[in-house]
Image (tube, rainbow, N blue to C red):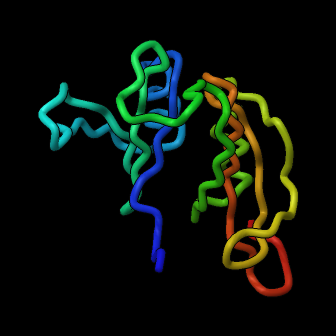
């Protein structure tokens, strides 16, 4: 049976802009890795024990999704940093909120979330797990 997600793959139009957003704004770390098949080194965005492999839309890595297109992903990330601080961080980077803050339902319970768009237009939800009885700070 399935136990967890090891990684996901995101097709991007401008890898450098994507890396800047996810690393400089969201605090992920860039990792280069060598595929086991000996093909050229690839890049991934890492956080915790998770990673997002990047596929350049101009030359997608094989195999790939049937229709690898940039901007077709909807992601939700959990954060311990309060949503109000995320709002400030996005404002400091000139990133407009798409939606929120708003209550949502996550995989393990209620969330307090804001939504933004990455450089490709992917929808990025940043969420705090809500404590019993109320919103996080």
Identify the residue shown where x is 59% and y is 28%: 67
Residue 4 horizontal side relative to residue 66, left or right: left
Asked which quadrant contains residue 53, the reply is top left
From the viewer's perspective, is residue 73 above or below residue 94?
A: below
Q: How many marks?
A: 0
Quarter holding the C terminus? bottom right
Q: Position of residue 68 (x, y in %)?
A: 55, 28
Identify the residue shown where x is 45% and y is 34%: 64
Foreground pick, 76 / 42: 42
Identify the residue shown where x is 31% and y is 33%: 43
From the viewer's perspective, is residue 111 above or below residue 50?
A: below
Return the residue found at the far bottom. Answer: 132
Residue 70 horizontal side relative to residue 47, left or right: right
Q: Position of residue 22 (x, y in %)?
A: 49, 36
Return the residue found at the far left. Answer: 38
From the viewer's perspective, is residue 102 above or below residue 124?
A: below
Residue 72 horizontal side relative to residue 35, left or right: right
Residue 31 horizontal side relative to residue 75, left or right: left
Identify the residue shown where x is 65% and y is 39%: 73
Q: Position of residue 50 (x, y in %)?
A: 41, 57
């Amino acid at each position: 049976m399935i136990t967890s997600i090891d990684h996901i793959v995101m097709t991007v139009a401008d890898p450098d802009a994507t890396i800047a957003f996810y690393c400089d704004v969201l605090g992920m770390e860039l990792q280069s890795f060598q595929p086991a098949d000996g093909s050229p080194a690839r890049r991934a965005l890492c956080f915790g024990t998770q990673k997002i492999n990047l596929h350049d839309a101009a030359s997608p890595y094989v195999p790939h999704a049937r229709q690898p297109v940039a901007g077709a992903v909807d992601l939700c990330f959990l954060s311990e940093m309060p949503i109000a601080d995320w709002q400030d961080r996005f404002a400091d980077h000139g990133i407009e909120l798409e939606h929120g803050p708003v209550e949502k339902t996550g995989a393990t319970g209620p969330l307090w979330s804001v939504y933004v768009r990455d450089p490709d237009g992917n929808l990025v939800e940043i969420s705090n797990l809500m404590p019993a009885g109320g919103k996080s700070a």
